[in-house]
């Protein structure tokens, strides 16, 4: 059974701090790892990582995947109160043909609270 | 607002009622999904439709009945639900072929009385 473990489960920081969120996984036939941010409604897509060692970056957020050690980190620099949310990590297995088998397995999420 | 639209946003129903949740996307995505999310838990996959055909049913009770009338629409028909079915129901869609992520709607918050 595929498994995703996120740490820490919750984190409280002050504005301006840098945070690192962790995601380790076990999956049969790995295809991709995804990060989502969830505030009160829809999880919103942040990054999709498929290759090891390549950093994806968007503004103050960045993420990297280590396929050998089976983990990913999500970094947020200069945090703002608007970064307060649950950050979800998910892994996507692949079919033998290389396509997606559609079944995302999510971790329990990291609840990030950024205080002013 | 997301590009995946779900209606209604909130629904309260009794255990004997029949209701439907609706999901729509116009991104040309060929895969559509229903997830159930309880408070403080991650989303759990219920159903996947690929090219308008049901491809995955995660052993969901028959009181939940999905329907995909066309490539843009996904419904979830509800009948004789239990109080433990109260949750946020999320719809998602994805291209289904290329390296594209699933995109989620804002969800329907369902309460069963």
Image (cartoon, coloured by chain):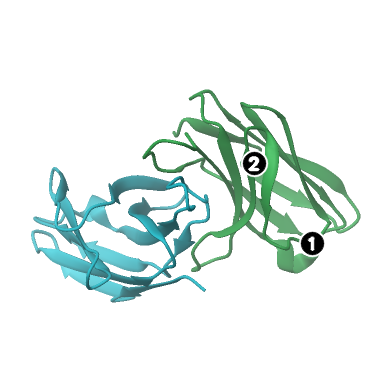
Chain colours: A cyan, B green
The answer to whether residue A51 is above or below residue A2 is above
Left-right relation of A88 to B53: left
Percent across and percent down for residue A70 are 27, 70
Q: Residue at x 64, y 41 (%)?
A: B49
> Is disc 2 in contact with disc 1, using a CB cutoff of under 8 Å?
no
Chain on which label 1 sits: B
The numbered disc on residue B61 is 1
Which residue, given by chain and number where applicable, does mark 2 sit on?
A: B49
Q: Nearer the viewer, residue A13 or B101?
A: B101
Q: Nearer the viewer, residue A71 or A77?
A: A71
Q: Nearer the viewer, residue A39 or A43?
A: A43
Other residues around mark 1 within 10 Å, as few (<14) / some (14–19) / many (≥20):
few
Q: Nearer the viewer, residue A53 or A108?
A: A53
Percent across and percent down for residue A65 are 21, 60
The answer to whether residue B38 is above or below residue A81 is below
Percent across and percent down for residue A97 are 46, 47
């Amino acid at each position: 059974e595929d498994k995703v473990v996120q740490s820490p489960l919750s984190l409280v920081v002050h504005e301006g701090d840098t945070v690192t969120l962790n995601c380790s996984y076990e999956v049969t036939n790995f295809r991709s790892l995804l990060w989502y941010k969830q505030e009160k409604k829809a999880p919103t897509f942040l990054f999709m990582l498929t290759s090891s060692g390549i950093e994806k970056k968007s503004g103050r957020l960045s993420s990297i995947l280590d396929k050998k050690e089976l983990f990913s980190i999500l970094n947020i620099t200069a945090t703002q109160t608007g970064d307060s949310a649950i950050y979800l990590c998910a892994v996507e297995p692949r079919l033998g043909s290389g396509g997606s088998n559609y079944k995302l397995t999510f971790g329990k999420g990291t609840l990030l609270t950024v205080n002013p | 607002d997301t590009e995946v639209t779900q209606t209604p946003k909130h629904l309260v129903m009794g255990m004997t009622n029949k209701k439907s949740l609706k999901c729509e996307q116009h991104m040309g995505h060929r895969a559509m999904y229903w997830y159930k999310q309880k408070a403080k838990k991650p989303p759990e996959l219920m159903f996947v439709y690929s090219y308008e055909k049901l491809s995955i049913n995660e052993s969901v009770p028959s009181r939940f009945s999905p329907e995909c009338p066309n490539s843009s629409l996904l419904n979830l028909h509800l009948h004789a639900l239990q109080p433990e079915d109260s949750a946020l129901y999320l719809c998602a869609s994805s291209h289904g072929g290329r390296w594209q992520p699933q995109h989620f709607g804002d969800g329907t918050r369902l309460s069963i009385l």
